[in-house]
Image: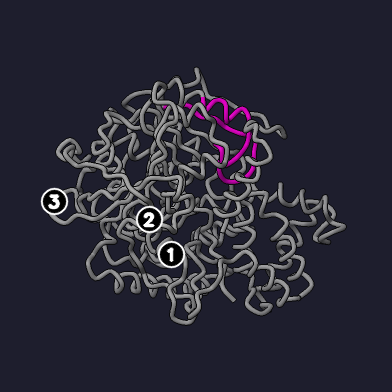
Amino acid sequence: MRRRRIVGAGLALAAAAGITGTLTVLPAAAEDHESTTVDWGACPEDVPGADRLECASIAVPLDYDEPDATTIDVMISRVAGTAPDERRGVLMLNPGGPGGQGLSQPTDLIDLGLPNDVTNAYDLIGMDPRGVGHSTPVSCGFTVEQGHRGNVPPYATDEADVAEQAETAKAIADQCAANDPDGLMRHMTTANTARDMDFIRAALGEDRISFFGASYGSALGAAYASMFPEQSDRIVLDSNLGATALDWDAQRRWGPGFEDGFPTYAAWLAERHAGYGLGETADEVRDNYFALAERLDAAPIDEFDGKTFRMQIFATLYKERNYAPTARIWQALADADGAEAGRLLEESQPAAPADAGTALSPYDNAWSSYLAVTCNDTEWPEDLATYQDAVEADREAYPMFGAAAANITPCAFWANDPAEPQVPVDDEGPANVLVVQNERDNATPLAGGVLLREAFGDRARLVTVDGDGHGVYVYGDNPCALNVTTQFLLDGELPASDVYCEASTASGLELDDAGEERREDVLDRIAQ
């Protein structure tokens, strides 16, 4: 049976390694490359919505310290603004990851219900970041047969589990190094991707660019606004990591994030106890979660152990649309029916390659690029005892998932140290950063939005939404958040103060039946 990719929806997360030297983070001189031209043409056929997009490949420096040496190709996409007289400029996009492919994001956002006023004002620019998808992709060589669980570390029940995970993590780090003979991975950083964005800005002939990034995209946008404040126009950061990298602190916040997000799912299940039998109250559902996880720790059912079950629930909390499918899997496992649980899990998987034994996993590039960026961006602990102590502390503080969030990853054993320090958030510059955040987001909890708002100071405002799950603007559907964010993109004026958006059952998107169908199709696809 194939493992589900827990780092799903292009909106995901992972870990990092050691640092050497005292290099200063400096922007590249994009103006040196303004002679670069963008030749728009057809997009690759495997890009969703390719027939509605234009694509172009741009050669950018592999190493910005040697801008005239080796180059790599970065592919971008475009949906041109629909009202030239109202054109504001370009709105660059990033769906998260790191490792999320972004060429389809312009049409994805349109189909999700991006307001017409925004598509009138902006050329929407998608991008497969360096090392991802159609942009000189990297590979650790993850195969289907290998059964890699993804970049979220497994729940550790004790110190021995952490030690066992350390062996797995080291093997993955060694595998990635062995599959990177040309040394591309060490140049995959958030800072370099931000430099690529500014290189592309210059190639497009734009003085400034606006940006919308979700999940890890919030870190990329924060880095760009900090490295290139005068070239940044209107910056929207959604579902926030809290800094310019996915560091250990951000990963450990998955523990409290799970605790904050689970009660909504538990209440949903309790209301449907007659159908699923998982608890008549939210407290009973929580108790049953622990009971089944511990039972599976002691006696796995087929390929489902406690680690897999906990990861499945973590992934479920991203969106309400995941609730029912996972409830059925949970119900089957509670009945000790591993075959039915496996069948239900298979329904959410992409089709297996014909030669599944040796074929690369369909997630190989996403997992590989995720590791490269997180491991290169910032310094992470390298000693086992540090992780064992953190796992014990977080298992006590956040028993549902803390012992997974604090666990060791391949970044502790990465082949190279970061080439430069993590990008610091710069609070000096234009007041042009809007931070939007759900209160109960398991993957990027509210604390990340608060931290980023504080770091940017007067440059930013925070929009907090009384909502659950991962993704606010257009990916979610809170009318207040939609209106505040859209207005900022159109007039560039931040709210006078931070904004709190009440929960709402009303839709702000005003989609007709066909629009609702297009939205559902996109949400289904990006959830795979």
Q: CA distance from mark 2 to mark 3?
A: 23 Å
Instruction: Look at the image and tell me in which quarter the C terminus lies.
Output: bottom right
- Amino acid tagged 2: Thr
Q: Residue furthest top?
A: 496
What residue span does the magenta drawing correspond to? 460-486
Q: CA distance from mark 1 to mark 2?
A: 10 Å
Label 2: how many Cα within 10 Å (few below 14, some 14–19, many 20+) = many
Give the numbered dot on residue 374: 2
User: Left or right of 72: which side holds 98?
Assistant: right
Residue 462 part of the magenta segment: yes
Across and down, in percent, residue 136 comes to 30, 59
Which residue is disc 3 drawn over?
A: 66
Q: Residue at x 32, y 33 (%)?
A: 426
Residue 91 figure quarter: top left
Q: Residue at x 31, y 48 (%)?
A: 56
Query: Sequence-wise, which precedes: disc 1 or disc 3?
Result: 3
Instruction: Look at the image and tell me in which quarter the N terminus lies.
Output: bottom right
Which residue is disc 1 drawn over?
A: 409
- Up the image or down, 272 lies above or below 289; here it is above
